[in-house]
Image (cartoon, rainbow, N blue to C red):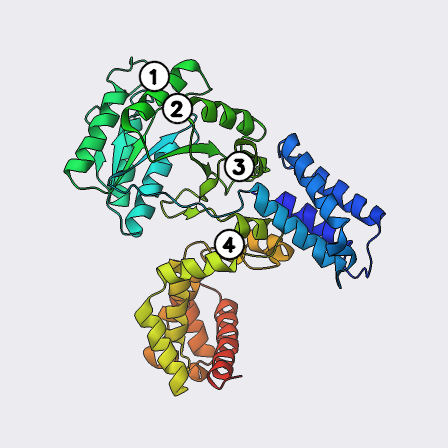
Amino acid sequence: MFNSLSDRLTATFKNLRGKGRLTEADIDATVREIRRALLDADVAVPVVRAFTAAVKERALGLEVSQALNPGQQVVKIVNEELVGILGGETRRIKLAKNPPTVIMLAGLQGAGKTTLAGKLSKWLKGQGHSPLLVACDLQRPNAVRQLQVNGERAGVPVYAPHPGVSSDFEAATGDPVAVARQGVAEARARLHDVVIVDTAGRLGVDAELMQQAADIRAAISPDEVLFVIDAMIGQDAVNTALAFNEGVDFTGVVLTKLDGDARGGAALSVASVTGKPVMFASTGEGLNDFELFHPDRMASRILDMGDILTLIEQAEQSWDKDEAARMAKKFADQEDFTLDDFLAQMQQIRNMGSMKKMLMMMPGAANMREQLENFDEREIDRVEAIVRSMTPHERVAPKIINGSRRARIARGSGVHVSEVNGLLERFTQAQKMMKKMASGG
């Protein structure tokens, strides 16, 4: 989402590299480019003004003039100010002292509330909680059914006493306020420690929507009210956020569709304008494409400094501990790295999710964005097919794979011989690297 902004800022900072001293003109030119980049990214004008004023004031101060590398110091200042407008600190869910913790979702129709309810419930389940989803959107056609499907996929129960409507021509019946109240009581009776209440949205902010949301809030006294907003809607995001803040007084923001190709100004504006933190981000369509929002990590991504901490967390969640221990023992015993090991490593990487997303978290990824965009996620499937077309002996002793064996492997895996050759070359390099690591190189 922030590709364009990231490219613009990175290009701006390149002009400062290598300069032993920055003049006021250098700083003015840099701040002017940052201002343009932020405005082009659809960041709210008041936020841009405050941000650039803070950067300029600090850049003209002693921390830059006395720095050994003033260019890097300016990048550091921009990074710190970006963290500030993104909310400053990571904000986590405040759990109730007496369960259940009640979380209410609010936002416009189409922002992805119902999908997000499923993602949040799965994430909470993974954190050791026992969530219950409550279907209070009785107006949008099939919203209740959609929540039930998401609940099934997440392995989380759904409280849905009313089926809602199945088409736009049906008049909405049922009382969402009563459903919400009953849902919380049901969670308490069934000993669920978290309740997620999915409420109705509208295509635009209106009095009826706000009144219903306010009535639900008053009935269930939620511990958290999360405002779900589509990160792709640009400048409108600020006005919508302010209206919801006034109407339901939300406690945190969830950004959806952060994997889109829009300019992303909403993400940089909402926390600063409303004073409410961004707590979660939805980064794709899958139930696992959901993460806690860390302002410092997001600022690092925008400035193309990478996000290694998130990468490590994802690896820890999906990596097979037994497999990791087995590989560590092989290193310690200085055993040969085989094609079976190579295949096991590739499968572990695939379990972590999209290769493109992971590689984009590496520092300097913007420099190879075009190659990453053209990367075929099915490459790992092809590698697996090639290795599985080899005999057990060939996987342990790849040096015996001559021309006729390569042709047989290519036929068996449905690829060209050149792809088999390429894989064997990459494996040889990996094997050398593993030997070097095992010997402490």
Q: From the image, state whether disc 2 or disc 4 is nearer to you.
A: 2
**Mark 4 or 1 closer to N-term?**
1
Q: Position of residue 227 (x, y in %)?
A: 43, 32
* Secondary structure state at the residue bearing disc 3: helix
Mark 1 → mark 2, Cα distance in angstroms = 14 Å
Mark 2 → mark 4, Cα distance in angstroms = 33 Å
**Residue under pointer 1:** 168
**Mark 1 or 2 closer to N-term?**
1
Indicate whether 308 appears above or below 390.
above
**Residue under pointer 3:** 271
Question: Residue 54 versus residue 270: which sits nearer the camera?
Answer: 54
Position of the N terminus by quadrant? top right
Mark 2 → mark 3, Cα distance in angstroms = 21 Å
**Residue under pointer 2:** 201
The answer to whether marks 1 and 3 mark residues whose Cβ atoms lie closer than 8 Å is no
Question: Residue 354 versus residue 290: which sits nearer the camera?
Answer: 290
Indicate whether 313 appears above or below 428.
above
Label 2 is placed on what type of residue? Gly
